Amino acid sequence: MASMDGMPDEVKSAPTVVQQAYQFAAANPEVMKKIPCYCGCEDIGHTSNYSCYISGEDENGRVTYDSHALGCSICVDITQDVMRLLKQGKPIPEIKTYIDQIYAQYGPSNMP
């Protein structure tokens, strides 16, 4: 989990489950970039569940946070499921399949 130190104030004052999702996403880009989101955020240019939390990173590694997941329970629920399934030892492809099966009812995937 990433430290809360560099997080925006909005994240620091968010519910714990949201804070944990931001911390996890920031610390695990290699995982989260492989996980889709189903909240409709592809309309705002998001390409994975990771981009619901992180909008960019500069050449020095400084992260720019996206505020989208602060108000989106689907984004946070997906991340919480990823965290739980990783803890259970599930591989990324199996986790992605699970996310696809559970969340496709909410809308299209933001991943090709």
Image (cartoon, helix red, strand yellow):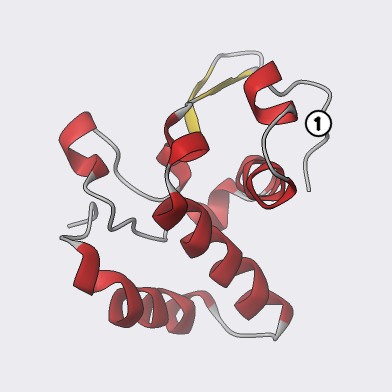
Classify residue 70 as left or right of residue 102.
Answer: right
Classify residue 47 as left or right of residue 11.
Answer: left
Question: What residue do we see at 74% from left, 47% from top?
Answer: 16
Question: What residue do we see at 63% from left, 22% from top?
Answer: 10
Question: What residue do we see at 70% from left, 42% from top?
Answer: 19
Residue 55 placement: quadrant: top left
Q: Where residue 105 sits: x, y (%)?
A: 21, 73
Instruction: From the viewer's side, name the closer residue of 25 and 16.
Output: 16
Q: Where residue 89 sits: x, y (%)?
A: 69, 85
Residue 97 placement: quadrant: bottom left
Q: Is residue 69 above or below residue 112?
A: above
Instruction: From the viewer's side, name the closer residue of 94 and 22.
Output: 22
Residue 109 shows in this picture: yes
Task: Say what amino acid the circle numbered 1 marks.
Answer: Met
Q: Residues within 10 Å of mark 1 (few under 14, many from 20)?
A: some
**Badge 1 element:** loop
Q: Where residue 11 sits: x, y (%)?
A: 66, 29
Residue 61 placement: quadrant: top right
Residue position marked by numbered label 1 in the rendering: 4
Question: What residue do we see at 84% from left, 23% from top?
Answer: 5
Q: Is residue 6 above or below residue 38?
A: above
